[in-house]
Amino acid sequence: MSLQDLVVVTGMSGSGKGTALKAFEDLGFFCIENLPVPLIPKFVEGIHFSGSEVERAAVVVDIRAGEKLKDLEEILIDPRRHPFHLFVLHSSGVI
């Protein structure tokens, strides 16, 4: 098995990122909170190439990562390197 879906949850402090992550965990996703952006590609490669049984993962990234989030998308979106679905969920905290 290999990674099929990766969800990156971003947002300001208090916007519900933790709640969203708990929901993904309840859905069977492997979840990591506050993973630094530079480590996400290493995390993905570790799952993808280690023969791990993780098919779905969700990570929380603080919105203060700023420009690094754009770099992350460019790195992870290459389907030849990582054939999985990438979803970015921005938690605005607006009800």
Image: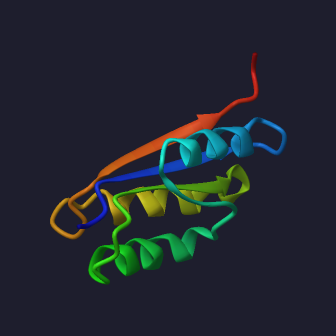
Expressed as whole percent of the image width and height from the top left, the position of residue 46 reads 39, 81
Expressed as whole percent of the image width and height from the top left, the position of residue 42 reads 44, 79
Relative to 26, 77 lies left or right:
left
Q: Check the image and name the residue furthest to the top.
A: 95
Q: Check the image and name the residue furthest to the right.
A: 14
Task: Tell me which residue sits at (36%, 60%) in the image.
Answer: 74
- Give 1 or 59, whichever is nearer the viewer: 1
Q: Quadrant of the N terminus?
A: bottom left
Q: Quadrant of the C terminus?
A: top right
Task: Tell me which residue sits at (37%, 74%) in the image.
Answer: 47
Give the tally of numbered discs: 0
- Give 51 or 7, whichever is nearer the viewer: 51
- Give 30 or 16, whichever is nearer the viewer: 30
Q: In which quadrant of the rendered view does residue 69 lie? A: bottom right
Relative to 4, 66 lies left or right:
right
Q: In which quadrant of the rendered view does residue 62 lie? A: bottom right
Task: Tell me which residue sits at (48%, 52%) in the image.
Answer: 29
Expressed as whole percent of the image width and height from the top left, the position of residue 41 reads 43, 73
Task: Tell me which residue sits at (35%, 62%) in the image.
Answer: 76
Expressed as whole percent of the image width and height from the top left, the position of residue 20 reads 64, 39
Colouring of the image: rainbow
Relative to 59, 93 lies left or right:
right
- Classify 18 as above or below 49: above
Relative to 52, 14 lies left or right:
right
